[in-house]
Image: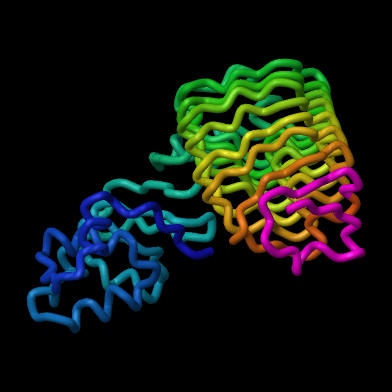
Amino acid sequence: MSKVCSPLSPRISRLSRSKKKIQLTRENLDEVIRYFPSIVDLIFIQLVSKKYKSLLHDLKENPVPLSKVTRHLFPNIETLNLYSPSSLIFRDGNIKTVVVKYPVPFSEMINKQRLNIKCTQVGYCYDDRKVYGEDIPQNVKLIMPHCYYKDKEMVEFTLPTHITALSASAFEKATSLRKIVLSLHIQKLVNNTFYMCTSLRSVILFSSLYSIGDNCFERCVSLKSLDIPKSVTFLGDCCFTSCTSLREMTIPSQVSSLGNGCFADCHSLSRLSLPKALSYIGSCCFKGCISLTTLQVAPSIKYGHLCFVDCFNLKVQKVNTFRCFGDAQNKLCITQ
C-alpha cells in the first residue's frame, strides 16, 4: 500500500507555482521530502548536491515506509512512522516513538495504545458502535466505511464537530435516516456516502464542503431539495441518480462539469439553475427527467452521449448548435 500524500503546505505550494529557479535550503528540503512517495526519491535527492549527502543520516523520522532492506538507511530516526497496516515495526536504534499514519478503528487504537503506539487518524466503525455505543469519542476524526450500513434505527444524526471526514458508504442504506447535519470540517462527500438512504429528507451542508462524489445521494427517493454550498466545485457520476422526489436544484457557480448520470431519472426535477462556468454535461446526465421543461445553457457547453434522452418535455434555450444531442435518439425538443 503506497503512502498517501497530503495537500502541500502553503509554503511549498508557493514554491511550486514560482517560475523562478529555486535553490532549496536544507530547511526547505526537510519539508519537501514529506511528500516523496518512495525511498528511491530520497536516495536520488542525495545525489543532487553535496549539501544533501547526509540527508537520510540526519532525519529524525522516516518520511516513507521502511522495510528490513531499507531500515539501515535511516540510522538516527527517533520516530517510526507507519503508513499502512503492512508496515513493519522496528524498536531498534534510537527509535522512541511509533506513530500510525493510516486510519484505524477506535478499538484498534485502544489496543495499540497498550503497545505504546500512537494513532493520528482514529476512525469509528460498525464494530466500535457495538462495543462502545453511539456516542463517538472526542479523539475520533473519521467515520469509517459502512459504519452505519443498513442501520434501521437512526432517524436524525448530527455529526460531532471533531469529525473531519466521512468514508465511502458510511451511511449507505440507512433507510430510516430522515435528517443529517454534517460537521463544519467535512470537506468532501465521497462515493456512496448516502446511497439509498430512502427516507432522507433534510441534509445540512456547510461552506467547508467542496466535493460531492459518485453515487453520493443516489436513490435518496425522499429528498425534495438540497441547498448545495457555493464552495462546491465538483459533482460526481450518478450523484443524484434516481432521486425521484427531487424538485429543484441550483448548481454552485464554480462547478465546471456535471458527471455522467448526475441527475438521471430524477422524475420530479422541474427547476434547475446551471452556472455560467459549466463547460461539460456528462453522458445520460439528465436521462428521464420528465418534469424538466426548460433549461438555459451556454453555447460553448459540450455534451456527453444521450445526456437528455427521454426528457420528453424539455426545451433547451440559448443553444447555437445541437449537433451532439439534438438527434431523434434523444427525443429532445429544442428552441433557439
Q: Residue furthest bottom?
A: 47
Q: Which residues are magenta?
A: 311-336
Residue 28, position in %: x, y? 16, 60
Residue ID at (54%, 47%): 276
Q: Indicate left or right for 294 with 277 as reference.
A: right
Residue 307, image x and y in percent?
78, 57
| In-image side of 199 versus 77 (left or right) | right
> How would you classify the magenta stretch by its main secondary structure?
loop
| Quadrant of res 170 | top right
Q: Would residue 328 be counted in the magenta stretch?
A: yes
Q: Position of residue 160 (x, y in %)?
A: 52, 21
Q: Judge whether residue 131 is colored magenta.
A: no
Tell me the residue at 82%/21% (across/down): 176
Q: Is residue 196 above or below residue 225?
A: below
Give the image location of residue 195, x and y in percent.
76, 39
> Looking at the image, which residue is at 17% across and 82% down?
48
